[in-house]
Amino acid sequence: MKMMNNLKLAGVMLSAIVLVACGNADEPALQDTPAVSETTVTETTAPEAQEAPEETLAAVEESDGSFDEEAQAREVSLRIAQNTAESTPVRFQEGTHFARFRPTKATVGGGNGIEVVEVFWYGCNHCFNLEPFVRQWKAGAAEDVSFVKMPAVWNPIVEQHAKLFYTIEALANSGELDSAEPVHQAIFDAIHVERRRIQTESAFKSLLAKFNVRGETFDAAWNSFEVDTRMRQAKSLNRSYNIASVPTMVVNGKFVTDETRAGGKQQLFAVIDELVASER
């Protein structure tokens, strides 16, 4: 009898199963973070429903049911949303396909939407080859996503190209260029298709002259406060993000990934999409 009582007192325990780049050096490891500990999930059982009195049942039957139908519709919608979220698998894993900055870093735009930054260099063949994929993804990005290009700045030649990038942006902002995009592509093509050395101010001016930018206009933008400010920000964020290779993608100052981590060009943007979704 005592043994039977002990058996009746025994419970069932449930446990939760938690559930290629251009660079100047090997990429530094991000700050190590402690492993996430398992969390015990406690199941809460709802109390048994009591039988409703006959008067209550009669009142419900006589009602037109509009309130109950609306409440039921809301409950069904909530259950569908919950089931959809639970049935959507997380495809990509921290430490394998992406890494997380701890603590979170500053963003280029300072909180304007969910920011995706591509850190690049005109002279990087991987950046050149990735460019069509970047444009295709950008064209289909949601309205709450803010895409930003940021140049790398790790040596004098790369820094000159960074200043060229921001000079082109400044010329577009002032209306001297109709758009910056064709000029950026022309620089990529000059370096990687035409095999030209685009490394000096005279070479920059010669290329921009094809877009009707005069030498003195170029000089004014090149030496402007706007370009100087953007260069300072790029240097600060390059240090903060530990940029040592390109192309590198940073999502909202929290996550960093690249082609190698993600497993290829197509999967890189699938990783980015999943990280963006996690920020909503």
Image (tube, rainbow, N blue to C red):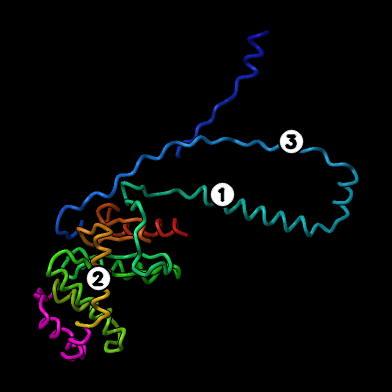
Residue 83 shows which numbered tag? 1
Left or right: where does residue 201 sit relative to residue 79? Answer: left
Pointer 3 local density, CA inside 10 Å: few below 14, some 14–19, many at least 20: few
Q: In the rendered structure, which segment of residues is drawn in magenta?
A: 194-221
Q: Residue furthest top?
A: 1
Disc 1 marks a residue whose amino acid type is Asn
Residue 114 x/y as whole percent = 41, 64
Relative vertical location of residue 267 with respect to residue 233 in this rendering, above or below: above
Q: CA distance from mark 3 to mark 2?
A: 65 Å
Locate residue 211: give its quadrant. bottom left
Q: Are marks 3 and 2 in contact (CB under 8 Å)?
A: no
Determine the residue positioned at 19% across, 77% down.
Answer: 164
Relative vertical location of residue 92 with respect to residue 42 in this rendering, above or below: below
Left or right: where does residue 70 sit relative to residue 78? Answer: right
Task: Please tell me whether mark 3 sits on a helix, a strand or a loop.
Answer: loop
Can you identify the residue that label 2 sits on?
A: 232
Can you identify the residue that label 3 sits on?
A: 48
Relative vertical location of residue 179 with respect to residue 236 in this rendering, above or below: below
* Residue 49 or residue 76, whichever sits in front: 49
Q: Are marks 1 and 2 in contact (CB under 8 Å)?
A: no
* Residue 89 or residue 230, whichever sits in front: 230
* Residue 218 or residue 67, whichever sits in front: 218
Relative vertical location of residue 273 with respect to residue 54 in this rendering, above or below: below
Q: Which is in the foreground here, disc 1 or disc 2?
A: 2
Disc 3 marks a residue whose amino acid type is Glu
Disc 2 marks a residue whose amino acid type is Arg
- The first of marks 3 and 2 along the sequence is 3
Pointer 1 local density, CA inside 10 Å: few below 14, some 14–19, many at least 20: few
Locate residue 238: give its quadrant. bottom left
Q: Is residue 218 magenta?
A: yes
